[in-house]
């Protein structure tokens, strides 16, 4: 979102809105009769990426065809379907598994006995869709069906079973509930009622209502209200517990997020209302009778049982990610067997953007991280919804309050809400755009390539990096700072809570992500120990401009001894404060990772001069600095053919009256150079000790 507090326009969502209908059915009274359909003589292949078509396939009963093959995408071939298949086989259906027992693909033989019906027993602890499938198809069985749900196992999403019974009754088939887990369905034929009012999709509405909560705006959803048969219509009650203001009539739901002002609310209503006076009066009443609101989202303190609205648990998790405190969601164990393992994927994707959360046996705990609202704008995180529409739409909700989120595979929403992206753009003014493919570092010109700074901690990568980036006209990023913002915790505390190994693994993930998304035009400071990760070393070797900031280790040790905020240095997996030992271990790594080296000689503390030198140095190695003003550029490297210098050699000439004065400093003076030549002009005979001669020769 361009603004985290952007007001959302009031939304009018209704299934009868002709503008949102892709097409009209030519015959609204489509007739369904007989005891089944007759496939052609060859097998009918049906492939799906969702379980929703499966219930409608069960009426295939009898006929002259050879059968039906039901297949699906990779995930559909993993989802368990044995509860449904076993029940149908026991009641006379000829169904076989083509590959793995218990999952798609299936072959249904329609030439033999057909579906006999009668007594059927099945488990309902995985999906209520299986129960609805049996019920909806039962009128076409050869005998009346009595369906018994196993009492030893919990029945998930019971409300959808109740909705199925109500709709079957509406279409002329009376389902008798003998006991809580036992149902009787007669042989019959569906009859179309003269008029049917279809409710809006309450689960789809939850995303829009949650966007109001995230942004502090307001959203009104029509055709989903207090009289809805869907339990997801009560999702707004959870948002109320988190600090939102809600107003729910029999046929509509309004949510206003925390911090939303009365004046803005009334303005929004005035802008979006029509000219109907009754509607305006009702809107005025709703907006002028509301309680004072808090200014931030708060976690729900007690455990939230979402067994009755499992499809909306991901929406709540997205809101909880930005709430203050911890929210625990329970009774959603069956969500592991949906389009993906939703518990595992939600936890993994939330953790990847800095939301601490844990998966439990029947749910998850989200520790909200409100700091995500303020994370670096230039950072981009790619969310992988694993082709699950509900996960994609839930992270779209989170993206309204979290800068820099990109969602992979936008078309996966077609399974449940094809117009989702268009609706949130048109109705809610959300900004949705394509994610450009990252440019390979190998094809970026030297003058545009990002400058990566490496080196020991305490050498000045952050301090110098910020200032030199300003001089070069480039944005600056500190990977350690980004890590802390993303995880909501200081690195020292993170290491103490988890481990160095976990920190290194997540540090590498962040580095690889930023390397792809910020390959051009930045100055980026890397963590001191990143070079100890082999995968990072290989990546550094492919980057065009990696500069080692090499400050004398004695000066580094003196500086670090005064700073207790940094975590202990690490050597061979063990804690250590021996800077010299760490330096000796990392020195060859820094040399191998970097393409250039900037040396700060021992004792040099003139940081203004050091900054000038570094600016001039980077102006040279980047050839044509991005954003550099002409006056500064000419002043720094006037009369120098930069292009010829880069990749060539440099010559430094130093003259001393007395060689003995410079011998002790020789190693520092020539640090970072390859060949060194020393000339002596003997105007005075000097006698050198053996140690001095060796030092001169070795330099």
Image (cartoon, rainbow, N blue to C red):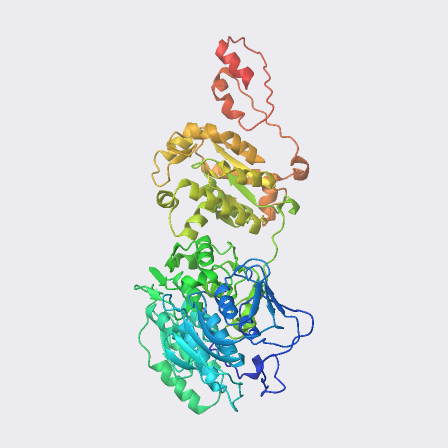
Q: Is residue 581 above or below residue 170?
A: above
- Quadrant assignment, res 496: top left
**Residue 31 placement (x, y as % from top left):** 59, 86
- Residue at figure coordinates x 30%, y 64% from the top left: 302
Number of numbered tags placed on the structure image: 0
Q: Is residue 667 above or below residue 230?
A: above
**Residue 10 placement (x, y as % from top left):** 46, 78
Q: Is residue 477 visible?
A: yes
**Residue 281 placement (x, y as % from top left):** 40, 88
**Residue 89 placement (x, y as % from top left):** 52, 68
Q: Is residue 640 above or below residue 676?
A: below
Judge by depth and name the residue closer to the eye, 132 or 271. Answer: 132
Q: Residue furthest front?
A: 113
Q: Is residue 603 visible?
A: no
* Quarter occupied by the C terminus: top right
- Quadrant assignment, res 495: top left
Judge by depth and name the residue closer to the eye, 194 or 507. Answer: 194
Judge by depth and name the residue closer to the eye, 123 or 247. Answer: 123
- Residue at figure coordinates x 35%, y 45% from the top left: 497
Q: Horizontal placement of 38 versus 306: left or right?
A: right
């Amino acid at each position: 979102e361009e603004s985290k507090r952007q007001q959302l326009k009031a939304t009018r969502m209704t299934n009868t809105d002709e503008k949102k209908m892709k097409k009209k059915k030519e015959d609204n009274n489509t007739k369904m009769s007989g005891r089944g359909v007759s496939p052609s003589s060859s097998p009918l292949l049906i492939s799906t990426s969702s379980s929703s078509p499966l219930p409608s396939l069960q009426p295939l009963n009898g006929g002259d065809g050879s059968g039906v093959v039901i297949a699906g995408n990779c995930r559909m071939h993993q989802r368990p379907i044995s509860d449904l298949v076993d029940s149908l086989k026991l009641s006379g259906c000829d169904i076989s598994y083509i590959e793995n027992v218990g999952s798609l693909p299936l072959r249904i033989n329609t030439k033999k006995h057909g579906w006999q019906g009668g007594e059927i027993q099945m488990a309902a602890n995985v999906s209520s869709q299986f129960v609805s499938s049996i019920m909806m198809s039962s009128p076409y069985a050869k005998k009346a069906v009595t369906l018994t749900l196993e009492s030893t196992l919990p029945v998930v999403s019971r409300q959808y079973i109740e909705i199925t019974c109500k709709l079957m009754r509406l279409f002329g088939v009376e389902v008798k509930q003998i006991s809580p887990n036992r149902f009787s369905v007669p042989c019959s034929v569906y009859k179309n009622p003269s008029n049917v009012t279809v409710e809006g999709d309450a689960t789809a509405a939850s995303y829009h209502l949650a966007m109001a909560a995230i942004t502090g705006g307001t959203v009104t959803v029509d055709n989903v209200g207090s009289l809805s048969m869907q339990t997801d219509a009560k999702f707004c009650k959870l948002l109320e517990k988190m600090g939102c203001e809600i107003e729910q009539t029999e046929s509509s739901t309004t949510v206003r997020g925390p911090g939303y002002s009365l004046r803005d609310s009334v303005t929004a209503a005035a802008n979006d209302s029509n000219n109907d006076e009754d509607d305006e009066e009702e809107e005025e009443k709703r907006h002028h009778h509301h309680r004072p609101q808090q200014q931030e989202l708060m976690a729900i303190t007690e455990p939230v049982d979402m067994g009755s609205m499992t499809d909306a648990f991901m929406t709540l998790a997205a809101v909880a990610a930005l709430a203050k405190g911890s929210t625990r969601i329970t009774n959603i164990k069956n969500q592991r067997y949906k389009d993906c393992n939703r518990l595992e994927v939600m936890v993994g994707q939330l953790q990847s953007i800095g939301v601490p959360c844990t998966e439990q046996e029947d749910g998850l705990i989200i520790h909200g991280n409100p700091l995500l609202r303020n994370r670096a704008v230039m950072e981009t995180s790619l969310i992988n919804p694993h082709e699950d529409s509900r996960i994609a739409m839930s992270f779209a909700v989170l993206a309204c309050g979290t800068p820099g989120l990109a969602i992979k595979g936008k078309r996966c929403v077609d399974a449940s809400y094809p117009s989702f992206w268009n609706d949130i753009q048109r109705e809610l003014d959300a900004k949705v755009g394509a994610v450009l493919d990252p440019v390979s570092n190998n094809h970026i010109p030297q003058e545009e390539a990002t400058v990566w700074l490496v080196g020991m901690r305490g050498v000045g990568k952050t301090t110098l990096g910020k200032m030199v980036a300003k001089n070069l006209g480039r944005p600056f990023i500190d990977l350690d700072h980004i890590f802390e913002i993303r995880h909501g915790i200081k690195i020292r505390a993170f290491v103490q809570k988890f481990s160095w190994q976990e920190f290194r693994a997540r540090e590498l993930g962040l580095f690889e992500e930023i390397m792809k998304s910020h390959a051009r035009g930045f100055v980026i400071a890397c963590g001191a120990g990143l070079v100890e990760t082999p995968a990072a070393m290989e990546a550094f070797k492919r980057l065009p401009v990696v500069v080692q900031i090499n400050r004398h280790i004695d000066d580094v040790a003196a500086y670090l001894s005064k700073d207790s905020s940094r975590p202990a240095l690490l050597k061979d997996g063990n804690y250590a404060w021996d800077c010299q030992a760490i330096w000796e271990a990392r020195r060859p790594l820094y040399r191998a990772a970097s393409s250039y080296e900037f040396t700060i000689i021992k004792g040099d503390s003139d940081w203004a001069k050091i900054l000038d030198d570094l600016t001039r140095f980077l102006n040279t190695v980047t050839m044509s600095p991005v954003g550099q003003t002409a006056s500064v550029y000419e002043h720094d490297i006037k009369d120098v053919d930069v292009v010829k210098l880069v990749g060539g050699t440099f010559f430094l000439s130093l003259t001393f009256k007395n060689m003995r004065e410079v011998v002790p400093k020789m190693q520092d003076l020539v640090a970072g150079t390859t060949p060194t030549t020393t000339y002596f002009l003997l105007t005075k005979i000097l006698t050198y000790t053996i140690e001095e001669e060796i030092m001169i020769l070795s330099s």
